[in-house]
């Protein structure tokens, strides 16, 4: 289990810490020897798997290299909204100098904190706002899901693949599009059905959706932005392949786990903390992928044919050195019109703002 | 397997958490007590049941623990509302929040862990019928829930105990004046409601979705409360309501996988819309409410 702090004992712990700080502050002004306090705020619980876990692991790597010079605190289960603003402000008031705001919905509150506290560095997940001490960060999952699509097409007997997805937002749509494009690189006739849960969190519904996709002959399922292993465990029971993002769930599906598009935030977090400590941090949009060591594919199923696996590794290397992008035209939209003209590659900005499905996705996109 | 088969085979299992919790709440409400803590009681039962099953206690013990946990919370509710005659709505909400908090607290070390579910029991012959066969292959708890529905209907409609329970809800003063212990009967009804909610939670966390995740009950307790009103406090209608809700929510998912061009947001909200519409239709029928309603619902009893 991870050792983390719930909101309740955070408040208790934090008040003790602040009392101690107050006492110390009276005795002598804060010295440079005080550890750098890093706070992670996330909307979900830090479990053994999932998004929150991936962020936490990234910070643990920072802790490992800095030792006692940094102190990490995690505040979990914080709903996006005024409550989050209050809690982030409190964390900064209590000495946090490096804040990781782990969800899109924290954007406005986190940005205010960054503006009011120029000495605090803020990293914000999946946003678009930038300030000198405020960097939004996101993973180029599409680079990994493209590779998973290649494997899925090789293993699918029906030519139908599915996905249980949270919300129809660009980040998730992009992952799905790359998944289909990768699959079509191996088998041009592959079709994708999607169930939009319209919820970040409903394990029971996620499982029902996996069953429904299976009932429609989908035999490889992409658990898109689901923090719980509900879909992966259900697919193991159904005997169909599945994969997910952020952290490996192989333990939940020892037989039918296709692989994991892992996010390893440690290189990015380390570089950011290094820059913060050196005073050279500069806010910028961090859209990180295979080349940055942030997006990785791990725990590939041994069932994938060696020939396909070789192609996958080749493509991965091409993505890493920048010679290949999943979003190079010609790409058709789901309705048959032109999405990306031949020879054109979408820019990062265009990739993160995709609001259309590629051809082969049979489920219409919700508005 | 097509969409229809998917809905038919999954409908009863999807309905079971709602059905169990709603039947318990129905008994409590029939005695005149409105317990809005169902959501939290379910979550608490779900956590306890999961912890016991995960630690090797088995499903039977898990369900026993969950029902005891449910009883414990409902006795606390009963102490405050029946003993101290506090407001039932406010107390129910508070107990519900307490249950959610306790489930998060005790479930914390088990976050995202899974257990194995249980197998299905098929009715020989019937389960082989094409299309509808899936209806007849269900896990044991679904079969027990169906049995409980029938027993509860019989008890409420045809036994002295049922009559007594209804009398206490309809006119507690009259029941008291002919010598029946109103508070004690209400206590029993509330405890039964708590046990059922706990069991409903354990079904959700150890069989239907065999994993623990904080917040996994995701509003199902509230649907159960709504179903009781939806069913005008009648066992049969609550049963059909639960089935309808289960079927419509599965239907929404099946429609998406089949590629129907209906916005998914609409499909997601369909079960709630259907519930609201049916509730509206039922509530507009005053006689129905008058015949089946519970006149003393939510009112503290004073001798």
Image (cartoon, helix red, strand yellow):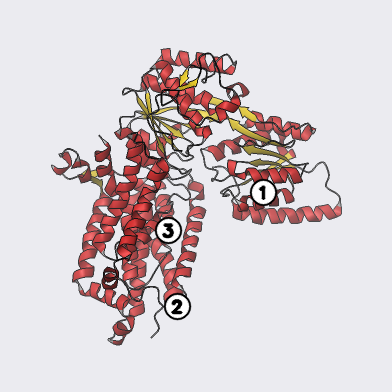
Badge 1 element: helix
Between A314 and B205, the one lying in front of the other is A314
The residue at which mark 2 appears reads as B85
The answer to whether residue B210 of the structure is visible from this angle is no
The residue at which mark 1 appears reads as A88
User: Of callouts 3 and 2, which one flags the residue occurring earlier in the amino acid sequence?
Assistant: 3
Rendered position, B123 above or below B242? above
Badge 2 element: loop
Q: How far apart are marks 2 and 1 (CA)?
A: 41 Å
Q: Same chain, marks 3 and 2? A: yes
Label 3: chain letter: B
Measuring from the top left, give residue B102's x and y in whole percent.
49, 58
Residue at 74% over, 48% down: A95
Measuring from the top left, give residue A300's x and y in whole percent.
45, 23
Label 1: chain letter: A
Residue at the extreme front:
A337
Q: Same chain, marks 2 and 1? A: no
Between A80 and B95, the one lying in front of the other is A80
Rendered position, A188 above or below A223? above
Q: How far apart are marks 3 and 1 (CA)?
A: 29 Å
Assign the N terminus of chain A to one quadrant of the image. Answer: top right
């Amino acid at each position: 289990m991870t050792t983390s702090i719930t909101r309740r004992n955070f408040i208790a712990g934090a008040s003790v810490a602040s009392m101690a700080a107050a006492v110390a502050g009276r005795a002598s002004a804060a010295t440079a020897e005080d550890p750098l306090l890093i706070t992670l705020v996330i909307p979900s619980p830090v479990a053994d798997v999932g998004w929150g876990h991936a962020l936490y692991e990234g910070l643990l790597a920072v802790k490992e290299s800095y030792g006692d010079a940094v102190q990490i605190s995690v505040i979990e289960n914080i709903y996006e909204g005024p409550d989050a603003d209050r809690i982030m402000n409190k964390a900064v008031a209590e000495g946090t100098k490096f804040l990781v705001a782990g969800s899109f919905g924290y954007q406005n509150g986190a940005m205010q904190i960054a503006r009011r506290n120029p000495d605090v560095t803020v990293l914000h997940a999946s946003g678009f706002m930038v300030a000198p001490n405020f960097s939004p960060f996101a993973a180029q999952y599409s680079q990994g899901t493209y590779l998973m699509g290649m494997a899925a097409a090789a293993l699918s007997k029906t030519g139908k693949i599915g996905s249980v997805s949270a919300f129809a937002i660009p980040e998730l749509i992009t992952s799905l599009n790359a998944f289909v494009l990768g699959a079509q690189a191996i088998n041009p006739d592959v079709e994708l059905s999607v169930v939009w849960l319209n919820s970040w969190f409903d394990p029971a519904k996620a499982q029902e959706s996996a069953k429904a996709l299976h009932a429609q002959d989908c035999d490889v399922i992409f658990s898109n932005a689901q923090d719980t292993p509900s879909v992966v465990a259900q697919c193991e029971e159904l005997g169909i392949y599945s994969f997910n993002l952020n952290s490996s769930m192989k333990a939940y599906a020892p037989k039918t786990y296709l692989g994991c598009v892992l996010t390893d935030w440690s290189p990015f977090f380390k570089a950011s903390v290094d820059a913060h400590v050196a005073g050279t941090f500069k806010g910028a949009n961090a859209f990180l992928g295979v080349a940055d060591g942030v997006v990785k594919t791990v725990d590939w199923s041994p069932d994938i044919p060696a020939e396909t696996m070789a192609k996958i590794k080749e493509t991965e290397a091409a993505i890493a050195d920048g010679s290949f992008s999943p979003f190079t035209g010609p790409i058709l939209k789901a309705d048959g019109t032109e999405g990306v003209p031949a020879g054109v590659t979408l820019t990062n900005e265009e990739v993160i703002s995709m609001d259309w499905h590629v051809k082969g996705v049979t489920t219409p996109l919700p508005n | 397997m097509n969409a229809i088969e998917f809905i038919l085979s999954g409908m009863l299992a999807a309905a079971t958490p709602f059905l169990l919790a709603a039947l318990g709440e129905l008994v409590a409400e029939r005695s005149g007590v409105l317990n809005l803590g169902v959501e939290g009681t379910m979550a608490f039962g779900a956590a306890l049941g999961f912890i016991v099953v995960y630690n090797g206690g088995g499903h039977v013990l898990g369900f026993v623990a969950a029902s005891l946990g449910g009883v414990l919370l409902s006795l606390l509710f009963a102490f405050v509302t029946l003993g101290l005659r506090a407001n039932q709505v406010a107390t129910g909400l508070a107990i519900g929040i307490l249950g959610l908090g306790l489930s998060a607290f005790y479930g914390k070390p088990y976050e995202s862990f899974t257990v194995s579910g249980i197998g299905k029991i098929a009715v020989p012959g019937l389960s082989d019928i094409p299309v509808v066969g899936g209806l007849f292959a269900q896990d044991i708890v679904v079969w027990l829930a169906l049995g409980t529905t029938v027993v509860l209907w019989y008890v409420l409609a045809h036994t002295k105990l049922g009559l007594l329970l209804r009398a206490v809800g309809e006119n507690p003063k009259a029941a008291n004046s002919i010598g029946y212990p109103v508070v004690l009967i209400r206590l029993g009804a509330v405890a039964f409601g708590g046990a059922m909610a706990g069991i409903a939670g354990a079904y959700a966390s150890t069989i239907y979705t065999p994993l623990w995740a904080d917040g996994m009950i995701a509003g199902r307790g509230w649907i159960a409360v709504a179903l009781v009103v939806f069913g005008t406090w009648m066992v049969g209608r609550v049963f059909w309501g639960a089935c309808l809700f289960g079927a419509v929510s599965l239907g929404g998912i099946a429609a998406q996988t089949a590629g129907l061009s209906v916005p998914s947001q609409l499909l997601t909200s369909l079960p709630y819309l259907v519930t609201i519409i049916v509730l509206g239709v039922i509530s507009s029928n005053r006689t129905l409410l008058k015949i089946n309603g519970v006149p003393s619902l939510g009112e503290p009893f004073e001798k």
